[in-house]
Image (cartoon, rainbow, N blue to C red):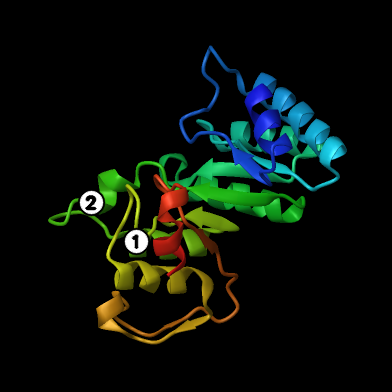
């Protein structure tokens, strides 16, 4: 709670739970949600700015995740977070529908992706995982960058960024888009630059 307050009070708009923070004995989820909510509203009152924190609602069952999402909503938190690969697609879609129906933003973390998409012989490219996430639902997702510890090839990264947010994407093999994709009316997902980003990466990131 103190760390969240100091970050938000210091000028950040949002902070987030770590993807590994669930409900361990040293930090039970309900206690964390309460402390974070207190920090959130205290920093808002003192700055006059809208603040937020991504509360990790990932859990072992859909029922438990919905319980945590409901608690976050009742506390007035604007956004929750889900580890969609460890939680699974059915769980993610359940949480996405709940969030949409109850005015919550859903931030998607891709924890465990490297186990799947870094193995070129028998893995699955993140492009496929990103498209599956768009089908499942979410508001924004960690999508890596072209710099930092989760960097990827520039053109390929920009290719799946377009697949996440655009309605119609033309085939372009140089960007890893192997066929024209028409999403029709399916909502897009905002790609979030993630993975070891710090201030010295900003020039390359905004290039």
Q: Give the residue pinned by disc 1.
A: 146
Judge by depth and name the residue closer to the eye, 3 or 172.
3
Q: Could you give the CA–CA distance between mark 2 and mark 1, rounded to whole angstroms? A: 15 Å
Single out the residue that lies furthest toward the left: 121
Judge by depth and name the residue closer to the eye, 197 or 142.
197
**What x and y, as percent, mark residue 95?**
61, 47
Residue 110, disc = none
The N terminus - image quarter: top right
Check the image and report above or below for 34 versus 189.
Answer: above
**Is residue 157 found left or right of 20 in the rendered image?**
left
**What x and y, as percent, mark residue 98?**
68, 49
User: Can you tell which quarter of the image residue 128 is in?
Assistant: bottom left
Q: Earlier in the sequence, mark 2 or mark 1?
A: 2
Q: Pointer 1: residues within 10 angstroms few (<14), some, or many (20+)?
A: many
The C terminus - image quarter: bottom left
Q: Report if the CB atoms under discs 2 and 1 are less than 8 Å apart.
A: no
Whether residue 63 appears in this view of the structure is yes
Q: Pointer 2: residues within 10 angstroms few (<14), some, or many (20+)?
A: few
Whether residue 75 appears in this view of the structure is no
Judge by depth and name the residue closer to the eye, 188 or 15.
15
**What x and y, as percent, mark residue 159?**
37, 73
Residue beneath the point at 56% across and 34% down: 17
Marks 2, 1: nearer the viewer: 1
Single out the residue that lies furthest toward the top: 25
Residue beneath the point at 86% across and 45% down: 48
Judge by depth and name the residue closer to the eye, 205 or 80.
205
Figure label count: 2
User: Can you tell which quarter of the image residue 171 is in?
Assistant: bottom left
Q: Secondary structure at mark 1?
A: loop
Q: Give the residue pinned by disc 2.
A: 118
Q: Secondary structure at mark 2?
A: loop
**What x and y, as percent, mark residue 205?**
43, 62
């Amino acid at each position: 709670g103190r760390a969240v307050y100091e970050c938000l009070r210091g000028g950040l708009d949002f902070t987030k739970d770590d993807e590994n923070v669930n409900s361990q004995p040293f930090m039970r989820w309900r206690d964390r949600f309460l402390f974070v909510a207190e920090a959130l509203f205290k920093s808002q009152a003192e700055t006059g700015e809208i603040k937020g924190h991504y509360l990790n609602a990932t859990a072992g069952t859909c029922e438990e995740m919905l319980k945590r999402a409901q608690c976050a909503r009742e506390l007035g938190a604007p956004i929750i977070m889900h580890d969609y690969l460890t939680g699974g697609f059915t769980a993610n879609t359940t949480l996405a529908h709940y969030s949409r129906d109850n005015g919550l933003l859903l931030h998607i973390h891709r924890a465990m992706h490297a186990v799947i998409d870094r193995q070129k012989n028998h893995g699955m490219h993140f492009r496929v995982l990103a498209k599956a996430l768009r089908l499942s639902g979410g508001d924004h997702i960690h999508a890596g960058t072209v710099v930092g510890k989760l960097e990827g090839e520039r053109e390929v990264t920009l290719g799946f960024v377009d697949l996440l947010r655009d309605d119609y994407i033309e085939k372009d093999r140089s960007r890893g888009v192997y066929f024209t994709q028409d999403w029709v009316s399916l909502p897009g997902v905002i790609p979030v630059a993630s993975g070891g980003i710090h201030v010295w990466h900003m020039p390359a990131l905004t290039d």
